[in-house]
Amino acid sequence: MRGTRVAGKNRGQIMLYALSTCVWCKKTKQLLDQLGVEYDFVEVDLLQGEERTQATDEVKKLNPRCSFPTLSINGQCIVGYDEQKVKEALGS
């Protein structure tokens, strides 16, 4: 599955599963950018075939409802936009 890496401070394993049309997904990316952390993200709706299936399966493991954004920070799952939880998970 192809993801995009955003450069920043390494704060561990951070993966954002998003939709390209989702306002809350965009806000989550903006928050991560403002915090200056390195993270990977994938816009699941832009994937096709096996890559899309693989990404959807990964989201379902973290978030059985398969809603977006789904953010994994060092194994902790945050569903939806939640600035406080993101900052707490990053130790900010």
Image (cartoon, rainbow, N blue to C red):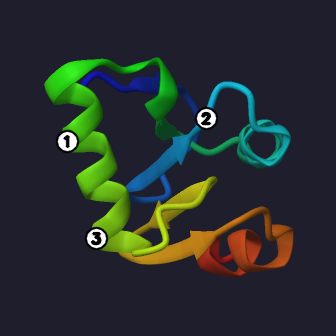
What element does badge 1 sit on? helix
Q: Quadrant of the N terminus?
A: top left
User: Which amino acid type corresponds to the residue marked 3 in the rendered image?
Assistant: Lys
Residue in the foreground of this view, choosing between 89 and 3: 3
CA separation in Å, label 2 and label 1: 15 Å
- Identified at 57% across, 60% down, the residue is 67
User: Which amino acid type corresponds to the residue marked 2 in the rendered image?
Assistant: Leu
Q: Is residue 32 visible?
A: yes
What element does badge 3 sit on? helix
CA separation in Å, label 2 and label 3: 17 Å
> Which label is found at residue 19?
2
Between disc 3 and disc 1, whose residue precedes? 1
Q: Residue 70's image quarter?
A: bottom right
Q: Is residue 69 above or below residue 60?
A: above
Q: Position of residue 22 (x, y in %)?
A: 76, 37
User: Which amino acid type corresponds to the residue marked 1 in the rendered image?
Assistant: Gln
- Identified at 29% across, 31% down, the residue is 52
Q: Report which residue position mark 1 lands on.
A: 54
Left or right placement of residue 47 versus residue 31 in this view: left
Q: Is residue 43 visible?
A: no
Q: Is residue 27 above or below residue 44?
A: below
- Identified at 65% across, 77% down, the residue is 91
What element does badge 2 sit on? loop
Q: Residue 87's image quarter?
A: bottom right
> Which label is found at residue 61?
3
